[in-house]
Image (spheres, rainbow, N blue to C red):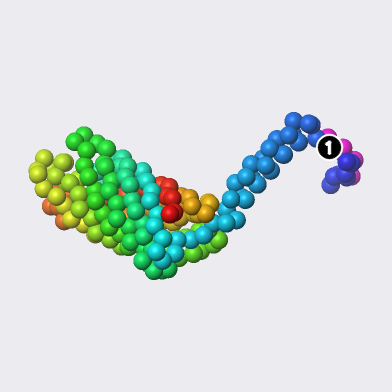
Amino acid sequence: MPYIDSLGTTTVQHYKPNDMKRLLICMALLCGIMLPTAEASAQEAGEFRLGFRAGYYTRAKAMGVGLYGNYGITDWLNIEPGVNVICKHDSSVDVYCDFQVPLEVALYWHIFPIVGISVNDIASRSAHADSWSFGVNLGMGCSYDFSMRWNVTGQVKWMGQTAKNNKSPVIIQVGMGYNF
């Protein structure tokens, strides 16, 4: 289709068959991604979510992987117990229980403040002692419900700990959950 550009010259732009195929494939992929989200819903009171997370413990300089369960106590309050295995020499365990207040910021998107408690042996491994540390978790997270049952999450939380020789880590995690 010819058009006149800003210099007054007439230009004809041709589309190659490969460009059109790429455009159609991209449109089909977008529809395939967007259509399942049309039925997504947020977690409500009485709903249970089970998921996994992977992340990085900054002060421990180690990766962690774990499982969590998230239960909607009310429409505005969730409780999330979980356990992470910290993958470093003489691997450690981090057991926590967090409370979250999910706030819907856009369709299928939620942010949530995090307040909780934890117990772990991160400090004992680095100090070569046989003791556990208790801590307080404070942070922020977000989740996106990409279908009726599945969601992805990301969170950052600070874990203030009681161990004398331990530096309180910041934990950066991403994960996926399934709603029952």
Q: Whole-percent x and y of residue 175? A: 41, 47
Quadrant where the N terminus sits is: top right
Q: Compared with residue 55, is residue 48 higher up or lower down, i.e. above or below?
A: below
Q: Whole-percent x and y of residue 92? A: 21, 42
| Residue 13 is a magenta residue | yes
Q: Name which residue lies at 72% across and 39% down.
A: 24
Left or right: 121, with 29 as reference point? left
Work out whether residue 176 or residue 91 is closer to the camera in this orientation and state it. 176
The amino acid on which the numbered mark 1 sits, given as a three-letter code, is Gln
Q: Whole-percent x and y of residue 145? A: 50, 54
Mark 1 surroundings: few (<14), some (14-19) or many (≥20) residues within 10 A = few
Quadrant where the C terminus sits is: bottom left
One can see residue 68 in this view:
yes
Left or right: 33, with 102 as reference point? right
Instruction: Report the number of discs.
Output: 1
Q: Quadrant of residue 13?
A: top right
Q: Whole-percent x and y of residue 72? A: 38, 63
| Residue 29 is a magenta residue | no
Left or right: 82, with 123 as reference point? right
Work out whether residue 63 or residue 100 is closer to the camera in this orientation and state it. 100
Work out whether residue 38 or residue 101 is closer to the camera in this orientation and state it. 38
Q: Name which residue lies at 26% across and 42% down.
A: 85
Left or right: 165, with 104 as reference point? left
Q: Name which residue lies at 78% across and 31% down.
A: 17
One can see residue 138 in this view:
no
Q: Secondary structure at mark 1?
A: loop
Q: Name which residue lies at 69% across and 43% down.
A: 27
Quickly name the residue at label 1. Answer: 13
In this picture, which residue range is highlighted in magenta?
A: 8-14
